Amino acid sequence: MADLKMDVVVVGGGFSGMYMLHKLRTSGYSVIVFEAGDGIGGTWYWNRYPGARCDIQSMEYSYQFSDELAQDWEWTERYATQPEILRYIEHVAERFDLMKDVQLNTRVGRTEFDEGTNRWQVTTDQGDAVDAKYLVMATGCLSSTNYPQIDGLESFSGACYHTGKWPHEGVDFSGKRVAVVGTGSSGIQSIPIIAAECDELTVFQRTPNFSIPAHNQPLDPGFVAKIKGRYRAFRDENRLTAFHADFDYNEENALDVDPAHRTNEYERRWAKGGISFMAAFADLMFDKNANATAKEFLHDKIDEIVRDPDLAAKLKPDGVVGCKRLCVDTDYFATFNRDNVSLVDINETPIRKITANGVEIDEGVCDVDIIVFATGFDAMTGALTRVDIRGRGGERFSESWAEGPKSFLGLGVQGFPNMFIITGPGSPSVLTNMLPSIEHHVDWIGDCISYLEERGVARIEAKADAQEDWVAHVNEVGDTSVYPQCNSWYLGSNVPGKSRVFLPYLGFPPYAEKCAEVANNDYEGFELSA
């Protein structure tokens, strides 16, 4: 395929890219999706590490655009595994015949906006040259892997893996000595499974994380029937909540109730499992003193589970609960009671370098056969800034975000006309159930393109003042919460040299209202050129 003229190029074949394709194609536009992998699925294509599982309940982690699809698909577990989620999106692609407009094994190289034609010139590593009016970046929030810079890594004689780029054939840990570097979500999910398979496991922890048991189980057919009996209303109700999910929100404040009542509510949430723990009280994410009551409860739980008091102390986060996305686990803390598992706190005992045989610390070399990096992602911005995007005047997208991302609504960026981002920085994205947030953005973008085409608009671009005001508003709202009070990937703090900026927008309902207001006012905040 060369010198192809299309209405829209979509970059990325995950949940956002596939629904964008369906939305635009249904509206009559010509679309091509470029996907770097040899299969679709995005995050759920690449993240195949042991224990990979969604932290949103499966009955809510699905598309809503088709009532028939929602009724026909059968989830098997409360929290779906990576293989099941991947089967789901592949089923959707087959059901709606999407793959005919998807080109796999293709990485977008350079995209350049032609001011003379008001169109994007897109080239790929496969030699494709595509002329398209619109460019939609569906590259995902958690898709650009973050590898730590450790001296000597290239000298290691064993096998190295990153949880975000896991081998499709899997990894055999039997009889092996394994190091896991990182205790974020992927580390917390994979460590119990790796520990059960390998001879020795050494966990290298920089920052301990709060985690709630998943209490995963097969879905009860009666529960499924009840939800499907009112599926549309159920999802509409969730849309009115901050996280866009059924979290059983409690309107009480933790500091307004007596300690016994507060503990009982925390116990109930712990027994229920999942990140809805954070909905136990309305003030947990806005009052540090209220949050401290949850922290104390979770510290006590770690003490109950981990038999070695010194080890339990190292596993207790000294921060704000939920300031980093709360993890969901199966037997994570109990795994440290195993005889074949040890913990190295790299704040006390830093990693000096990687040697041919393992990981060198002050006490010597920890001999290992396999190193697993569970070090997360260059979240929300990395997948975008690593593409060579050039806007008006040849401005490089990566340079425009060098001091932190700026966008209007997380959808458009000043200087880059006719380009849209799905769940970009400045939108709720990772502070919500991602699937409905993706659909909200795709629907908004699709409706916007139809509006522009019906009126013969040649170019749409975020206005500079609207963008600046929105960035300020995102941070103003974020500052009302406890989110900025710790170092997390929400602020880019996990990537050395990355600007520390609060990336997502806090609160789905007001955000959705703002998006609707902008659209209803003829895309106020955007410059439209005839």
Image: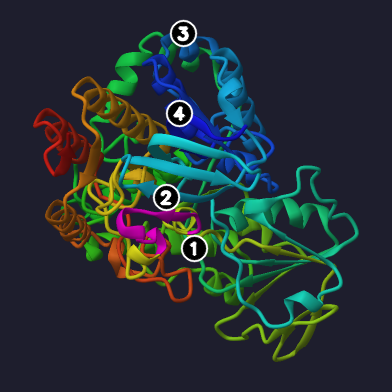
Residue 253: image location, x then y, percent: 19, 50
Name the residue carrying label 1: 209
Name the residue carrying label 4: 6
Mark in the foreground, 1 or 3: 3
On residue 146, which mark appears? Answer: none
The amino acid type of the residue labelled 3 equals: Glu
Classify 10 Å Cα crowding around label 4: few (below 14), some (14-19), many (20 and above): some
The amino acid type of the residue labelled 2 equals: Glu
The amino acid type of the residue labelled 1 equals: Asn
- Residue plotted at (21% across, 25% down): 456
Residue 380: image location, x then y, percent: 42, 54
Q: CA distance from mark 3 to mark 2?
A: 40 Å
Of label 1 and label 2, which has the lower sequence position? 2
Residues under numbered marks 1 and 3 in contact, where contact means CB atoms less than 8 Å apart: no
In what element is the residue under mark 2?
strand
On residue 68, which mark appears? Answer: 3
In what element is the residue under mark 3?
helix
From this viewpoint, which residue is outermost toward the bottom? Answer: 362
Of 263 and 442, which appears nearest the observer?
A: 442
- Residue plotted at (53% across, 10% down): 72
Q: CA distance from mark 1 to mark 2?
A: 41 Å
Q: Is residue 177 left or right of residue 361?
A: right
Q: Write down the region rendered in magenta.
A: 386-398
Q: CA distance from mark 1 to mark 3?
A: 40 Å
Residue 60 seen: no
46 magenta-colored: no
Name the residue carrying label 2: 112
Of label 1 and label 3, which has the lower sequence position? 3
Of label 3 and label 4, which has the lower sequence position? 4
391 magenta-colored: yes
Q: Quadrant of the C terminus?
A: top left
Mark in the foreground, 1 or 4: 4
